[in-house]
Image (cartoon, rainbow, N blue to C red):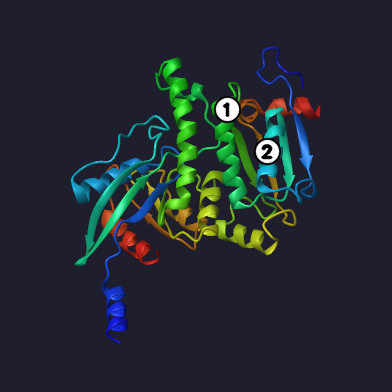
Amino acid sequence: MAMKKNSKIRGFSIHIMPYSEIRELTITERVKKILQLVLGNRVVILQGRLRPEEEIRLIEDTMAMVDHIKSFKGIELAVVDAHGNDSSFFLKMRRGIARGLTGESNSLTVIGPASIVKEIKKDPSKIEVFFG
Amino acid sequence: MLKILSRFFGGLFKRRDNIKIGFYGPPNAGKTSLANLLCKDWTGEELGTVSEIPHETRQVQFKEKVEIERNGKKMLLKIVDTPGIATKIDYEDFLNYGIGKQEAKKRAKEATQGIIEAIKWLDDVDAVIIVLDATENPYSQVNITIIGNLLARKIPVLIVANKIDLRKANVKKVEAAFPEYSVVGISAKKALNMDSFYDEIFKLTKRV
């Protein structure tokens, strides 16, 4: 699928991040690593999910970046659960806690630059540019 | 002995003063509308301005000494209304509401700082009212992140499903998403079901 000439997406890549890549990092280092990738126009697919305090820190640091980097609009964050996205919050949390809330879970966390995800939402065929 | 008895009965009948209740949730769910209604009902004064434009509240705002009364019992609250939490802020989104570019950029900058401030306040509230728009999907990642953090911090939570005056509102869906929390459906705009809301606030503060 060809990309339109005037598309706002100039290119992005997907970074698959096994949990082992962040296992030894502190909360600050984890968030920094993810944000560095996102700022480099990468959509990060993390094995497992972040802890609640890491997610909120990610939002906090993202806002600080939006405030300082002109072209950065923020992130899209989604946890894709193997058990379906519409199961209750507590069911998800229980599964998460049982597996240590992190890399051992059947979840995947997708974190990408908001501007890219916005463009993909407008025209989902653009994602095919990457895979095509 | 007298001291022990005095402490026991003192604790039993003591009125907890100035319990800090934070209003949290995504942008445009009606946090300030609800905080306004609560403050107006019990103090006669509102707290902040509301608008259809997202991120109208860009600074944490307070109302001290809000005394509410149910069944002869009184309670003194400090209401903490926070900016809506989001993962992205794009000034271009404000342009759709007829705001000029410079003003939109200023608003976006203030909104990012407001979100940071709201997150910092999580360390300083005694209980939280999560205000959700009952016409929207409750399973959004921001909602789950906020509630996950409150759960981890052991902060008591009440979930308000706002906008029940709208046909699309689905309180059952909110209840299904968060079955272990009290969920109360209200309309801050039309002041619907506020008695149940105030009853739930009393129950919430008992868990502080």
Q: Position of residue A110 (x, y in %)?
A: 68, 41
Q: Position of residue A74 (x, y in %)?
A: 58, 31
Q: Is residue B136 visible?
A: no
Determine which quarter of the picture holds residue B2. bottom left
Q: Residue at 80% x, 49% y: name it.
A: A20
Q: Which residue is mark 2?
A: A32
Label 1 vs 2, first from the N-terminus? 2
Mark 1: secondary structure: loop
Q: Residue at x 30, y 64 (%)?
A: B16
**In the drawing, does residue B141 fall left or right of residue A105?**
left
Quadrant of the frame with the N terminus of chain A: top right
The disc labelled 1 sits on which kind of residue? Lys
In front of the other: B19 or B91: B19
Classed neighbour count for the residue bearing mark 2: other residues with Cα under 10 Å, few (<14), some (14–19), many (≥20): some
Horizontal and vertical percent position of residue A40: 72, 28
Chain bearing mark 1:
A
Point out the frontmost of discs 1 and 2.
2
The amino acid type, in three-letter code, at marker 2 is Lys
Which quarter of the figure has residue A131? top right
Number of other residues with Cα within 10 Å of mark 1, as a class: few under 14, some 14 to 19, many 20 or more: many
Assign the C terminus of chain A to one quadrant of the image.
Answer: top right
Whether A5 is drawn above or below B158: the answer is above
Q: Position of residue B116 (x, y in %)?
A: 50, 38
Marks 1 and 2 share the same chain: yes
Q: Is residue A131 left or right of residue B199?
A: right
Q: Secondary structure at mark 2?
A: helix
| Residue in the picture at 63% in, 52% down | A51
In the picture shown, does residue A81 fall above or below B69? above
Q: CA distance from mark 1 to mark 2?
A: 17 Å
Report the disc number at residue A73: 1
